[in-house]
Structures are given as structure tokens and as C-alpha cells.
Image: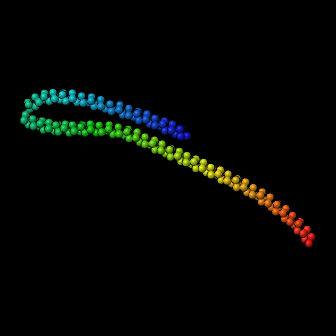
Amino acid sequence: MEAHNKKKRKEDFERERLTLEQDISEKTQHLEYLYNRKKMLKKQAEEEDCRIREERTRFQGLVDLLSADAKERYYNFQTIISNLQAEMEKLQQELERLTEKKIELGRLVVDSELRASAVSMYMELIEAQEKRNAVLKQMRLQESEDDERERLLCEANKEKEETVALEEKIGAASQEIQLLHEDLCETQPRSNNVS
């Protein structure tokens, strides 16, 4: 029974290990996909930045040709755009930080699940050992009771044999007393007759 339970726990642990490995593999592939996509998007963004810089240079030449009022409106828009770009950069950094934290938490979750599984199996092992010890203790008690019963039975048989022997002796002594009494009775009337 214990071997069967041990085999079942081993099979359960192996099945859980395979599930966790598959889950880790899927998450790793997904993270690699996200990393490669981020890399590609970053490259595209760099190319786009380069193109934008070129366009800005060309556009700056056109701005220089604008009137003073148009130039002021243009520079106001440029300030707004710069502020939005700075905010976007902060958000991008925050997104990267949160992505790294998510990856780390994913690793911790897998480690926690393995630890929880190991603790659960350890507790089952302790419980099985306690049950085994209780059964062994019960068996020892049973053996002690059987030994005690056998000892008492031997003593009872011995006392019975001694009682039977005493009864036989008492019976023999009673017969002897009876015979002596009869002899005495027979001899007394003769002595009465003689006198």
C-alpha cells in the first residue's frame, strides 16, 4: 500500500514537473517573442527618428522662410511636441521596468509552485510515517497483549494442574481417613466387648 502511494506521489510529482516545464517553456517563448518584437520596434523607431531628423532639417529650412507670427505658432507647437515626447519616453521606461518585473514575478511564481509541491509531498511523507509508526505501535501492543494472555493462560493451567493434584491428594487423604475411621470403629466395639 505504501509503495503504491509512493509510486502515485512520484507520478503526480513527475506530471506536475512536466506541466511546469511546459508552462515555463511557453512563457520563455512568449518572452523571447516580446523581446524580439521590442528589438524590432526599437530599430524601426530609430529609423523613424533618423527620418524625422532629416525631415526636421528640411522643414527648418522652410520655417526660416515663414513670417514671424507663423514662426511663433510653429515654435509653440514644437514645445508641446517635445513635452509629449518626453512624457512618452518616461512611459516607455516605466513599461520596460514593469515588463522586467513581470518576468521576475513569473519566475517567482514557478519557484513558489515547486516549493509548495515539495512541501506538500514532505507533509504527506510525514503523515505516512506517523501512520506507519501508529500501526507498528499497535502491533507491538497487540503482541504484548498476546504475550500477557499466553503468560496468564500458562499460569492458569499450572494452577489448575496444582489444584487437580491437591484435590487428588485431598481425595486420597479422605479415603485414608475413612479407612482409619472404619478401622477405628471396628476396633472399638471389640474393645467394648472385651471389657
How many tags in the picture? 0
- Seen at 43% across and 40% down, the residue is 118
- Give the position of the N terminus as an image quadrant: top right
- Residue 180 in which image quadrant: bottom right
Q: Nearer the viewer, residue 189 or 20?
A: 189
Q: Is residue 55 above or below residue 169?
A: above
Q: How is the image coloured?
A: rainbow
User: Residue 12: percent from the left, percent from the top?
Assistant: 47, 37
User: Residue 19: percent from the left, percent from the top?
Assistant: 43, 35
Task: List the single residue furthest toward the left.
Answer: 68
Q: Nearer the viewer, residue 142 or 179?
A: 179
- Residue 76 in which image quadrant: top left
Task: List the single residue furthest toward the front.
Answer: 195
Drawn side of residue 187 relative to residue 100, left or right: right
Residue 53 visible at all: yes
- Seen at 8% across and 31% down, the residue is 64
- Give the position of the C terminus as an image quadrant: bottom right
Q: Is residue 57 above or below residue 135?
A: above
Q: Nearer the viewer, residue 33 or 73?
A: 33
Q: Nearer the viewer, residue 121 or 164?
A: 164
Drawn side of residue 32 relative to residue 133, left or right: left
- Seen at 30% across and 31% down, the residue is 35
Task: List the single residue furthest toward the bottom.
Answer: 195
Drawn side of residue 33 relative to residue 80, left or right: right
Residue 77 visible at all: no
User: Residue 94: percent from the left, percent from the top?
Assistant: 25, 39
- Residue 111 in which image quadrant: top left
- Seen at 24% across and 28% down, the residue is 43
